[in-house]
Image: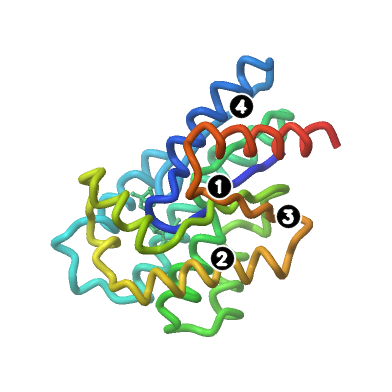
């Protein structure tokens, strides 16, 4: 089973994913946790290029393709082999991040074009379940700034992040059999409990 976590900045995805991994392993599941961009040696190098504050001249096309290059490597090297062995893969961001950020956020390219590039990069691999940790954009950015991890990608203006959030909500609405929207403005514990419930339900099916 392939499960992805998505959400705007500061939605708490990364901490929630770590808690979920521990929980599922305690329950006896074989779980592989990974993240995007990155998750492989090559992917981590691409991640460093993407988050380098010095790369201000990076063009949207370049950015879009770098995310796909990292993803292609991750899918072939890590995700597909683990799924083929019957394991669970949990991924912190995946293709929907590209649609939300490069598609709905930047609005530089038609969504169909972005979808075609994603489909090429992933070889058509889609998640079985996607959890959207939804949080108000201002609250999320504030949480993120307090965390001190403020990189080039965070510097886009508020409206950009608002489009990202709306894009996520639209995708979730369009494909309700895959997406579950989780209100991430609540306490860490409350959010984690709901995530566990949803994931255990999906695994039981
Ligand atoms: P990261 O530090 O992992 O942020 P977060 O904790 O919010 O996941 O940085 C990932 C950034 O890259 C984040 O701003 C979202 C962005 N991103 C895209 O724009 N497109 C993509 O396809 C992916 C995977 C991430």
| Residue under pointer 1 | 5
Q: Secondary structure at mark 3?
A: loop
Question: Where in the figure is residue 172, as x and y percent of width and height?
Answer: 66, 63
Q: Nearer the viewer, residue 36 or 158?
A: 158
- Name which of mark 2 and mark 1 comes first in the sequence: 1
- Name which of mark 1 and mark 4 comes first in the sequence: 1
Q: Secondary structure at mark 1?
A: strand
Q: Is residue 8 above or below residue 16?
A: below
Q: CA distance from mark 2 to mark 3?
A: 13 Å
Crowding near pointer 3: few (<14 within 10 Å), some, many (20+)? Answer: some
Q: Which mark is residue 178?
A: 3
Give the mark toward the camera: 3 or 4: 3
| Residue under pointer 2 | 168
Report the residue at 18% width, 70% height from top: 56
- Name which of mark 2 and mark 3 comes first in the sequence: 2
Q: Are marks 2 and 4 in contact (CB under 8 Å)?
A: no
Q: Residue furthest left?
A: 54
Report the residue at 56% width, 36% height from top: 190
In the rendered structure, the answer to whether residue 152 lies left or right of residue 91 reads left
| Residue under pointer 4 | 31
Report the residue at 64% width, 38% height from top: 194
């Amino acid at each position: 089973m392939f499960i992805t976590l998505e959400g705007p900045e500061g939605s708490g995805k990364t901490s929630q994913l770590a808690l979920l991994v521990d929980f599922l392993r305690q329950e006896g599941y074989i779980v592989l946790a990974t993240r995007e961009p990155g998750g492989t040696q090559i992917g981590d190098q691409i991640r460093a290029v993407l988050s380098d504050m010095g790369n201000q001249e990076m063009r949207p096309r370049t950015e879009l393709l770098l995310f796909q290059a990292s993803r292609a490597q991750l899918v072939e090297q890590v995700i597909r082999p683990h799924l083929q062995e019957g394991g669970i893969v949990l991924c912190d961001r995946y293709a929907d991040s590209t649609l939300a950020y490069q598609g709905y956020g930047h609005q530089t390219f038609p969504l169909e074009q972005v979808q075609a590039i994603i489909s090429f990069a992933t070889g058509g691999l889609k998640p079985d379940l996607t959890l959207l940790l939804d949080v108000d954009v201002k609250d999320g950015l504030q949480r993120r700034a307090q965390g001190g991890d403020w990189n080039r990608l965070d510097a886009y203006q508020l409206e950009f992040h608002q489009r990202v959030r709306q894009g996520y909500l639209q995708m979730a609405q369009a494909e309700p059999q895959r997406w579950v929207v989780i209100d991430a403005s609540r306490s860490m514990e409350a959010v984690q409990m709901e995530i566990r419930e949803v994931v255990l339900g999906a695994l039981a099916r």
